[in-house]
């Protein structure tokens, strides 16, 4: 271990964030910049009979008004992942137009774009655009969308299915195992729809330079290079080398800023039309209506057990909403990011998952923190606890009976699941043992019994969740075979300046993760130089050679590994220069503490001197190129598999159903840890979001497709006082297949925590015969569960 | 989140504010703390063409003891009320209710008069004003008048205020025994149910907010009260109970009974 890796070093970027000096897209004001406001549909499903922009065009300050009839109507944003039907039929992929043409398919879909000198003028003029709609019946529930009489989201197909899909063992084999099981536990629930709620709303500025015929797109994205590729090659048909995409500071994404959105393409198109920069920033209402949502799976599942509580098989049938159009990664979420996790941490011998993915009259659904894995984990961790409850087995004990035994992926092979993946390394029982110890599980059960009998109206419950997830996305050939239309490698360039200072360019993108600190920690250690000598650059396609962005907890595992590859090249070339200067053989040199030393002597040369020599190559190895600057692509050989145990303790007010989260214990294993403070922060934030899903959050559409939870008056996010002090610990099982041994920590909290909280509430009410409650567990739902 | 264009006048006296209100009629809105009005304007749900800002009128800022009453100026913020020694001493339930409103920023800006005039059916103060049997002092172009709390609230966002009137102060009789109990809506933190109880010997007054389209005195509870909390069963007698996705009418009625009982027992 070096001087920095593994230390809780404070985040460098926080100085500017805490001072309000971050550089977000909406902070930029370009010369001659115009402002855009949208006219959005108040209906979920309607024919557009006419759009009259004449009054808006006359309004003060208006530069232009566009509708689908104005050229931009021919463009649509693409989907980046193809999942075909089980019968071989190609995935149904509707055009997702930049502005709606003939038909509206969700509330908030844009019909017209008004460009004006100021935002106020754009807003006022947008109110003058007259749209005549013919409203049609809508369907927002994924299961109802597949009923025979459901209104069609896209008329060209006979039903609303975008695709269907299955994974695992033969269905009949799984059904036979369930039929022969000692006990079968059934569940039916909706993994409810969530709004991502990044603190910075989406914001785009396109600046078209007429003289150079070049664009600069400033965008709040997690994924600048992919946005450029999609925008240029798949939407507008403009040359990629003519577009620079910049995403400086981005205020959170949770997945919602991975995707290429219609507004992003439209501002780019408009800026060339008007020859001026144009800015659009979503307000919070627009964010609720137009940011890709998460989850929304309707699940019916069965798990079979033998009489000891060993799992014999699991079968799940799910309807997973796609929304009105296919967002960038949407088809991957309920399939390859979901079904492949059905093994969980258990030796379940037979698994079958069947997914139907319908279009609905809602905003598109896509990856949201965890993306498919929280849904898989929720099902597994609820159904095993429900099975334990029904069979009278302790929730911890049933897990110990079913765990995959420890394996490190080096001395023991990786674990081959029934659902395509091979786990890299894991010691699942260790995190549960530690979690139970942190909680004081035995004592808790006594306290719970006492609370039930003391008549103060408060019921205590404990819930366990032992999760696994797949991160480090992803081996390109593997995902390519599964339908991905992109490679998922990462790029890391290390440019040593003549003075020995180091600029690192990463294709990963920080929108709150702390790359500038963590990446500098391991780079400084690998080179044996101070952290202050290392600068991390990201988020600009003209600085960074290429990149695939940040999501799926991939930055360190994939992006960090690419940087390590470049550092290896730097040190290899540096050794040649050092050997020349020291008049020694390369084989006799060792590199440590920022210098090459001839082994067994005091002859050495510093990293800085070697760097200077590389750029002032007067006395230099023959045939060696000057310079010290390497770029590497890293394509991982496998996913990474973080895991852990989350335990929640709740107190339920018997009279009101209000759940009070009293304790939250998390023992996670994310492989090697570069910065424990940042890992703790990620775990804490993830847990807050997972608790939000368990207890508070839900996007609700009514029967007409109106969103009735479209503001913070009606959509409940977790607040500081909803959460206890989170108690964290870790075990460390390094990833065997990447150079840093890291697995990723960005999503674990949101994946592990949700079922722990729900299990705890059900446990609190178990003596009343309660075995399940639908999320979010609002006081009303909990109270009603107690009444039945 | 950009409101329509509007004019803005900062009034320096109650007389001037009333004159402006009379002059501009329904086109005008009174701006006090602005924590309900401004969000509605940003969403363009409310588009007044002129705002008359009364927040600078010093005469509406006082909290004074007048014999058996505490008089609170309409411009007093939730924070000023919660922190006032007089209120804490003689109207503890009002201080408690003020402390449950929104968050620190809202309590620093929002005012008692603004909240009462806005008449959100889930606002906290109305329950207290009703339970205290307070009197709302209003002033309009025809002079001043006093409105009993029970006559003031007429429905959702509807009060006894005439178009040219503003609230100037609220007269609260001192309370020796009372309390406010609230069940929070998890998103907005308004009251799903808010219950204020004032006890006066064997008599009790019960104000309820959040349950119906207007706050109300739970007179059935008051009549049935004989010193124990069983009367709480009558919390929603004769009341049409609201329903939304946080609390349907069954659950809300149940909560009303629970919180009336808790307030009676407290």
Image: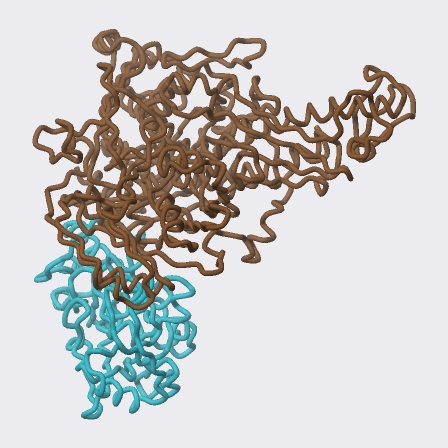
Chain colours: A brown, B cyan
User: What percent of the width, then of the height, locates residue A250?
Assistant: 48, 46
Of A367 and A9, nearer the camera is A367
Q: Quadrant of the C terminus of chain A?
A: top left
Query: Where is residue B212, by image quadrant?
Result: bottom left
User: What percent of the width, then of the height, locates residue A618?
Assistant: 85, 31
Up/down of A475 relative to B74, above or below: above
Of B182 and A458, nearer the camera is B182
Q: Kindly identify the residue that appears in the image at 41 percent across and 36 percent down.
A: A232
Query: Where is residue A18, by image quadrant?
Result: bottom right
User: What percent of the width, then of the height, locates residue A702?
Assistant: 17, 45
Q: Does residue A554 appear anywhere in the picture?
A: yes
Q: Is residue B149 left or right of residue A218?
A: left
Residue at the extreme front of the image, as rendered: A211
Q: Is residue A588 left or right of residue B156?
A: right
Q: Does residue B184 appear anywhere in the picture?
A: no
User: What percent of the width, then of the height, locates residue B53?
Assistant: 34, 80
Q: Quadrant of the N terminus of chain A?
A: top right
């Amino acid at each position: 271990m070096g001087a920095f890796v593994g230390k809780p070093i404070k985040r460098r970027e926080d100085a500017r964030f805490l001072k309000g000096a971050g550089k977000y897209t909406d902070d930029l004001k370009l010369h001659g910049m115009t402002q855009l406001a949208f006219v959005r549909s108040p209906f979920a499903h309607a024919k557009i009979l006419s759009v009259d922009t004449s009054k808006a065009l006359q309004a003060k300050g208006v530069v232009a008004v566009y509708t689908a009839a104005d050229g931009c109507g021919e463009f649509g944003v693409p989907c980046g992942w193809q999942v075909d039907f089980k019968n071989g039929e190609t995935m149904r992929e509707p055009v997702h137009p930049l502005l709606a043409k003939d038909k509206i398919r969700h509330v908030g879909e844009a019909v017209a774009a008004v460009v004006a000198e100021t935002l106020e003028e754009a807003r006022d003029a947008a109110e003058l655009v007259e749209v005549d709609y013919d409203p049609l019946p809508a369907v927002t529930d994924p299961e109802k969308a597949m009923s025979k009489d459901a209104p069609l989201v896209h008329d060209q197909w006979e039903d609303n299915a975008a695709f269907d899909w299955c994974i695992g063992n033969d269905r009949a084999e799984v059904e036979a195992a369930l039929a022969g099981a000692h006990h079968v536990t059934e569940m039916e629930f909706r993994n409810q729809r969530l709004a991502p709620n990044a603190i910075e709303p989406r914001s785009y500025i396109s600046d078209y330079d007429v003289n150079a015929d070049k664009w600069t797109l400033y965008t709040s994205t997690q994924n600048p290079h992919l946005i450029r590729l999609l925008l240029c090659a798949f939407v507008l048909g403009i040359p990629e080398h003519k577009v620079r995409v910049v995403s400086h500071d981005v205020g959170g994404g949770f997945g919602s800023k991975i995707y290429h959105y219609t507004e992003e393409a439209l501002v780019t198109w408009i800026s060339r039309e008007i020859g001026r920069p144009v800015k659009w920033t979503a307000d919070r209402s627009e964010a609720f209506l137009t940011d890709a949502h998460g989850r929304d799976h309707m699940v019916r599942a069965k798990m079979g057990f033998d009489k000891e509580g060993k799992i014999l098989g699991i079968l799940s049938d799910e309807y997973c909403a796609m929304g009105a159009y296919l967002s960038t990664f949407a088809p991957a979420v309920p399939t390859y990011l979901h079904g492949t996790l059905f093994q969980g941490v258990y030796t379940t011998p037979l698994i079958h998952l069947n997914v139907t993915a319908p279009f609905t009259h809602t905003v598109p659904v896509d990856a949201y923190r965890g993306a498919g894995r929280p849904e898989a984990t929720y099902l597994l961790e609820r159904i095993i606890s429900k099975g334990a409850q029904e069979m009278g087995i302790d929730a911890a004990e049933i897990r110990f009976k079913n765990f995959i035994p420890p394996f490190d992926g080096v001395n023991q092979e990786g674990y081959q699941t029934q659902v395509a993946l091979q786990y890299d390394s894991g010691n699942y029982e260790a995190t549960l043992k530690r979690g139970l110890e942190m909680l004081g599980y035995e004592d808790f059960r006594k306290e719970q019994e006492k609370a039930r009998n003391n008549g103060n109206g408060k019921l205590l419950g404990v819930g366990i969740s032992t999760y696994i997830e797949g991160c480090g996305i992803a081996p390109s050939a593997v995902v390519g075979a599964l339908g991905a239309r992109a490679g998922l490698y990462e790029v890391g360039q290390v440019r040593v300046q003549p003075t020995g200072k180091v600029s690192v360019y990463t294709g990963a993108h920080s929108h709150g993760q702390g790359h500038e600190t963590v990446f500098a920690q391991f780079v400084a250690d690998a080179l044996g130089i101070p952290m202050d000598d290392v600068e991390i650059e990201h988020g600009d396609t003209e600085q960074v050679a290429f990149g695939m962005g940040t999501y799926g907890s991939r930055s360190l595992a994939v992006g960090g590994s690419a940087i390590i590859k470049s550092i290896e090249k730097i040190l290899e070339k540096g050794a040649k220069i050092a050997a020349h200067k020291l008049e020694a053989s390369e084989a006799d040199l060792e590199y440590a503490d920022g210098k090459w030393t001839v082994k067994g002597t005091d002859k050495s040369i510093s990293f800085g001197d070697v760097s200077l020599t590389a750029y002032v190559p007067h006395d230099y190895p023959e045939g060696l190129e000057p310079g010290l600057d390497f770029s590497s692509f890293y394509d991982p050989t496998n996913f990474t598999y973080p895991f852990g145990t989350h335990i929640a303790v709740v107190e339920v007010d018997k009279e009101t159903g209000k759940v009070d989260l009293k304790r939250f214990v998390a023992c996670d294993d994310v492989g090697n840890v570069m910065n424990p403070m940042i890992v703790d922060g990620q775990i804490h934030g993830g847990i807050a979001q997972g608790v939000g899903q368990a207890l508070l959050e839900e996007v609700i559409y009514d029967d007409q497709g109106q969103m009735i939870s479209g503001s913070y008056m009606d959509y409940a996010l977790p607040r500081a006082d909803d959460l206890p002090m989170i108690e964290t610990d870790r075990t460390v099982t390094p990833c065997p297949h990447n150079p840093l041994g890291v697995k990723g920590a960005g999503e674990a909290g949101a994946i592990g925590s949700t079922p722990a909280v729900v299990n705890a509430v059900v446990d609190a009410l178990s003596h009343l015969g309660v075995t399940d409650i639908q999320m979010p567990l609002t006081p009303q739902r909990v109270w009603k569960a107690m009444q039945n | 989140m950009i409101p329509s264009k509007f004019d803005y006048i900062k009034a320096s006296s109650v007389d001037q504010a009333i004159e402006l209100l009379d002059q501009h009629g329904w086109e005008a809105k009174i701006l006090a703390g602005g924590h309900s009005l401004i969000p509605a304007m940003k969403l363009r749900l409310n588009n007044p063409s002129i705002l008359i800002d009364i927040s600078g009128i010093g005469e509406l800022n006082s909290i004074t003891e007048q014999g058996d009453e505490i008089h609170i100026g309409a411009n007093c913020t939730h924070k000023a009320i919660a922190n006032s020694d007089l209120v804490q001493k003689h109207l503890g339930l009002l201080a408690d209710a003020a402390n449950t409103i929104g968050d620190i920023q809202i309590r620093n800006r929002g005012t008692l008069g603004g909240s009462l005039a806005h008449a959100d059916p889930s606002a906290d103060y109305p329950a207290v004003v009703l339970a205290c049997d307070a009197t709302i002092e209003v002033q309009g172009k025809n002079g001043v008048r006093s409105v009993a709390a029970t006559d003031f609230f007429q429905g959702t966002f509807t009060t006894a205020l005439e178009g040219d009137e503003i609230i100037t102060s609220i007269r609260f009789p001192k309370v020796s025994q009372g309390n406010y109990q609230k069940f929070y809506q998890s998103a907005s933190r308004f009251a799903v149910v808010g219950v204020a109880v004032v006890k006066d010997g064997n008599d009790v007054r019960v104000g309820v907010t959040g349950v119906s389209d207007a706050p109300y005195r739970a007179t059935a509870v008051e009549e049935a009260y004989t010193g124990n909390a069983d009367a709480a069963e009558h919390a929603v007698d004769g009341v049409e109970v609201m329903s939304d996705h946080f609390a349907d009418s069954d659950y809300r009625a149940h909560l009303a009974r629970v919180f009336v009982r808790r307030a009676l027992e407290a």
